[in-house]
Structure formats: structure tokens, C-alpha cells
Image: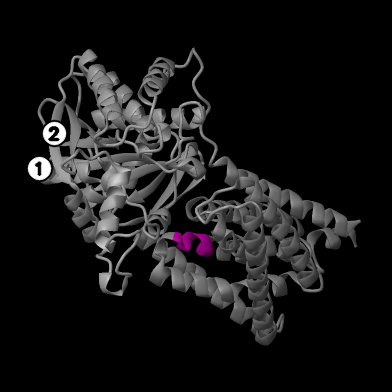
Amino acid sequence: MSRIISIILLIIVLVTGIGLGAHLFQPPMPPSKSDANYPAYKQMMSNLKAMTFAAHPSGSKELESVRAHLLEQIHTMGLKAKVEKVTYTVDDVKADLFERKGKPDFKNMPSTINGVSPEEDIRNSIREKNHFDKNDKVALQNILVKLDAPGTDRGILISAHYDSEPETPGAADDMLSVVAMLEAMRKHTGDMNLKSDLYFLFTDGEEVGMLGAKSFVRSQPELRHKIDLVFNFEARGNRGSLLMFETSDDNLDAVNYLRAASSRLLSFSFLTALFHQMPNDTDLTRFLKAGYSGLNFAAAEGAENYGRETDTFANLDRGTAYHYLLTTLEIADHAAQVPFEEGGKQDSLFFPLSPSYLLIMSSFTSYILSAVAVVLAIWWMILQIRKGNFQLRAIMTGTGWLLGVMIGAALLSWGIIAGVTQVMHLGESTNNDKVFFSIFFLMSICTLIAGIIQTRKLSLREALAVFIPLHLLLIVGGAVLFQEISYLFSLTTLGILIVALLDKYRVGRWIASIVVGAGIVFLYTPVCWLIYVLFMLPFTPVAVAISVIPISIVSALFVTKDTLVLKSCE
């Protein structure tokens, strides 16, 4: 009976931790008619429907209609828009592509591709993705609106692009951001109490290599010293919570400023590093290269609709739509009253504890946390070895077994992915939640069984000690290579030590096992989910391998031979 109770507690802890982690990614419910934001939401959705009737790539007649609607809305507010027009040729776009991505090695390429030279094939590809005129030119038109604050020339800029890819109406990417900005602008039109200038920039040509944003930062260099912070809104999917996924360097002040502005903020410090491993760029890339400070936002779930004909008004998640509106309104409201002031040049480490609270610490503090975790872990290991509670050889063997389970789970899930993608004809750039959850559930059960088998004959201290060498390596490696995610390993290590130190106290250990176990699973859940969401289904084996760690730790907390339940029943 006691073993059954232990396993039940184990499952409850796993489900609780996963549930809390998953809850972070739930967008807010759309406002009811009695909500103060309902009129803005209703107007936003009306504009969105009107401007996503068809695909509207740069240079197309459809984009002219979208631009006309956008300018009409601005005019209706009694505001003046500055329209900046710039013309690019196919060769300009090609040269910019080579500058950003590197020039291909044409010498080692076939002399002809699709019957033409490699360079001409690249030109043809650029022509197919955009509406160039008969002279191979495309005219881009940025739209800028400025709300002047009396007594200052400093402010913040909110940006989004209003062009789409040729095959998609672009409801999420990026017209949702555009219409949310319109409502933030509408709210502050005529506001005589602004403490900061508010700039609203609607760029053209983001899908042509962010050339509209490139033109903007080059044509108005004086703004570099007037705009203190750029908020850029994008989309890579059409559902889920809005993520703040990229920051400029020395971001501590910027992230603190955003936390003060937003009531529902979802972000993780490691996202910037992950994003830079992806082939995507955004308009913010142009601003960061020009020396601006900025933050980037996007919905990431539903990437199977990204750039597709299914990115429509009807398919857009309404909660996601409201999250864009809420965030944009709150940023504009905060900036209108609180100017951004950058203090020291410090980076930060941050992650959410709930949908409404982002924990932020400076990089220096995160290094201290890592150092404390390392010192305490080594001290505890040495102490236990001296007391004869376990042998170092046995611990290293256990750690090797853990790594073997991680590798085995990754290889098995990779085999399943390879088979499933062939049978279902899924491409490499695919997100299929049903496949992911099915594989993840299967691998979790296998890991859980393996963890129970391995730890049921060990003492709690022996079982927990198995995780220390791996986490020491991860903490040190993170401190050197990837400090933005070091909190995951430092806090996990400290949690393990807390339970181990309370081993002698039945009630204390019981409470600590439940709280620490659920907390560790909570911390790991977003990491596994985001790896899948950002890098698609083929990266499921990586997420599965990482998930072995928290599942195995929870197994050690509840099914060792001297668990609390067994002690209390003796």
C-alpha cells in the first residue's frame, strides 16, 4: 500500500508541475462587454478583418488598400502620418541578402540551376516572393506617427510591419500587431499629459528582408538619440501567449521597465540565445544593429500557419489577439507616464513565476546564485562521502546511468519521429501538437518506469546524489556558455539539497519533496515546450532528453527505499 501511495504522490507532483508550467502559456480571455478594454478590442478586430481580406505583399495593389485603410484610421483620429517612400531593385534586395546571410560560394555550385545561373536563380526567387514592377523595382512606404510630449524630446517607439508574404493574408503576421498599435495610438490621441514622446512606426518590406526598417534607421539618424527604447511586435504563429523573445544587450533596465508596464508578461532570458540560433530576423534586427535598445514580441504557437494561407482572421486565437492588444496598450500607457531611463549597463536573467509575475535578477546576482549552488553541492557531497553514506564510484555509476537514459530516450523518440513524419508526410518545418504530446507522454512513462526501477533500492541521499555531478557540469557550463538559463540548474540543485538536508525530519521532508518536486517540473516544462515550439517537431528528442532530468528527480523523491511514506508506515 505504501508503495502505491508513493507512486500516487509522484504522479500528483508531476501533473501539478506540468500544469503550472503549461498555464504560463495560456493567453488571457478576451474582454467581456463590461470590460474597459472591450471597445478597443472590438475596434481592433473590426480593423483586422477589414485589412486581412487577401495577401498583401510589398508593391501589390492589395497592400495599397491596406495602407489606405491604415491612413484613414490615423486621419480619423485627427493625427498626421509621415509617409516615407523608398525604392529598391531586385539587385538591391539580393545584395542585402548576401550582406546579412553571406554570399554563396558560386564556384562550388552547379553552373545552372533550373536552367539559369545560380545568381539569376536567386533573383528569380526574390521576384517570386515580391511584387516588383516591370523595371524590377518595388516601392516601400513606411508610416510614422508621433505623439508629442510637452517639455521633452525623448520617447519610445512601437513598431510592426504591415506587409505580408505573397501566400498569406497575414492576420497574425503581422496585421494583429498593426491594429493593436492603432488602438494604443487612439487611446493617447490628444493626451496633454504625456511624459514621453510616443512613436508608432508601421514598416513596409519586412518580408523583403526588413528593408523598410533598414531605410527608416538610415534616413533618420537623429532619432537614435531621441528614442530610448524600441518595442517591436511580430508573429511566428497564430495562438498561445505573446512572448517577449528577444532583447538588446545590457537589458536589465529594459526588462524591469517592461515588467512595470505589463500585467501579463511571458518571457525567459534564454529565449534571445535560442532565437539567434534560428534563421529568422525581424525589423528589430535593423534597430539593434543601428545601436538602439529594444525588446521583441511574438506569438510562437501555431507555427504551422506561419506564412501560409491559413493565417486568417477566422483562424486567429482570440485570446492571443487580446494579449497583443493588452500588452501594447499597457506599454503605451506606461511610457506615456514614465520615461525610460537606462542606468547601469547590466544584463539580466529572468523567468516567470506566474502569468503575472516575472522574476528578474542581474547577471551578477545569477553568477552568485550559481556559485552558491556549486559550493553547497560540493560541500554536501564531500560530507556524505566522509560519513560513508555513499561512495563516489557508485554516484558516478548512477550519473552514467542517468545519462544513458537521456540518450536512450532521445534516440527512441528520434526513431519514432522519423517514422511518424514519413507516414504522415510531415516536413522538417512542422509543428504537430498531437504527435509531440503522444511521443512526450510515451517517453515520460518509460522514463518514470526506469526511474522507479533504478531508485527503489537506493536511499534518498544516494538517489539524489546521482544528479549532483550532472548539475555541477550544467551550472559551470551555463556560467561559461549560456548563463541565461543557469537558473534552471542552480535552483534545481538547491532544491535537491534542501530535500536531502531535511531527510531526518519526516514532515519536513514530505513537504519539501512535494514543493521541490513540483517546482523543478514547473521550471523544466517551459524549456521543453519552447524547444519544440521554436525548433519544430524534429527537435522533440532534445526536449525529451531534457525532460528525463525532472522526471527522474521526482522518482528519486518518492520511491527510494526510505521514503517518507514507508517510514511513517513502519
Say above or below: 171 vs 564: above
Q: 161 or 480: nearer the eye?
A: 161
Q: 536 or 111: nearer the eye?
A: 111
| Residue matched to label 1 | 219
> Pointer 2 and pointer 1: residues touching (CB < 8 Å)?
yes
How many labels were placed on the picture? Answer: 2
What x and y, as percent, mark residue 538? 55, 59
What x and y, as percent, mark residue 21? 58, 47
Q: CA distance from mark 2 to mark 1?
A: 9 Å
Residue type at the position of mark 1:
Ser
Let me know if residue 373 is in the magenta part. Answer: no
Say above or below: 68 vs 323: above
| SS category of the residue bearing label 2 | strand
| Number of other residues with Cα within 10 Å of mark 1, as a class: few under 14, some 14 to 19, many 20 or more | few
Q: Is residue 358 left or right of residue 227?
A: right
Residue 536 numbered mark, or none: none
| SS category of the residue bearing label 1 | helix
Render colour scheme:
one colour
Magenta segment: 485-490
Residue type at the position of mark 2:
Glu
| Residue matched to label 2 | 84
| Number of other residues with Cα within 10 Å of mark 2, as a class: few under 14, some 14 to 19, many 20 or more | some
What x and y, as percent, mark residue 287? 22, 48
Q: Could you tell me which quadrant the C terminus lies in?
A: bottom right
Q: Quadrant of residue 390?
A: bottom right
Q: Disc 2 or 1, which lies upstream in sequence? A: 2
Residue at (58% x, 76% y) in the render:
469
Chief secondary structure of the magenta span? helix
